[in-house]
Image: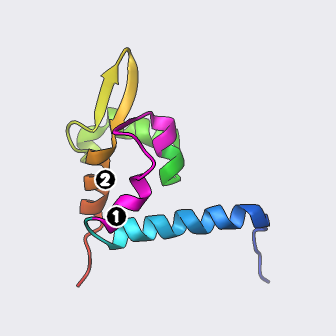
Amino acid sequence: MSTSMAVAPEDLGSLESRQSDITVLVGARNTSQRRLFDNLRELERPEAVASVLGISIATIYDWRYRSRQRKVPAGLFVTFNRRLYLRTDILQEWIASQNPQRC
């Protein structure tokens, strides 16, 4: 018995693109890993970051309020005009440090 999820043909390209971007980010260093963050500004709202990484917004707020337990780097979150933003440069470094390149 095999179950498969049906994916619309127009969604397949974006799914493959996101998968390759994450693979590049996780498996590479320096210039190659920037592809996932190329279209993001230095400060992004949690909704945009969640969309790019394919995670829920609740996960990002969990990082915010349980930063010590989750070992989130200092300075990742910035509040401006009572709105929460994430610094993409620190996020990029954090993701890269969580997935070191294997020799």
- Residue occupied by mark 2: 92
Q: Nearer the viewer, residue 85 or 57?
A: 85
**Region rendered in magenta:** 31-49
Viewed as shown, does residue 35 lie left or right of 74? right
Type of amino acid at the residue the image marks with label 2: Gln
Q: Which labelled disc corresponds to residue 33? A: 1
Q: Which mark is residue 89?
A: none
> Left of 76 or right of it: where is 5?
right
Q: Position of residue 28 (x, y in %)?
A: 31, 72
Instruction: Looking at the picture, tell me which residue is in the foreground, 80 or 60.
Output: 80
Q: Nearer the viewer, residue 26 or 10?
A: 10
* Relative horizontal placement of residue 92, taking residue 12 as reference (left or right): left
Q: Is residue 100 visible?
A: yes
Quadrant in which the C terminus is drawn? bottom left
Q: How is the image coloured?
A: rainbow
Query: How many discs mark residues in the rendered view?
Result: 2
Q: Is residue 7 visible?
A: no
Reply yes or no: does residue 68 show up in magenta. Answer: no
The span from disc 2 to disc 1 (Cα, nearest Å) is 8 Å
Q: Is residue 100 above or below residue 102?
A: above
Secondary structure state at the residue bearing disc 2: helix
Q: Are marks 2 and 1 in contact (CB under 8 Å)?
A: yes
Please state which amino acid type lies under the numbered disc 1.
Gln
Pinpoint residue 30: horizontal percent, then vertical percent.
25, 65
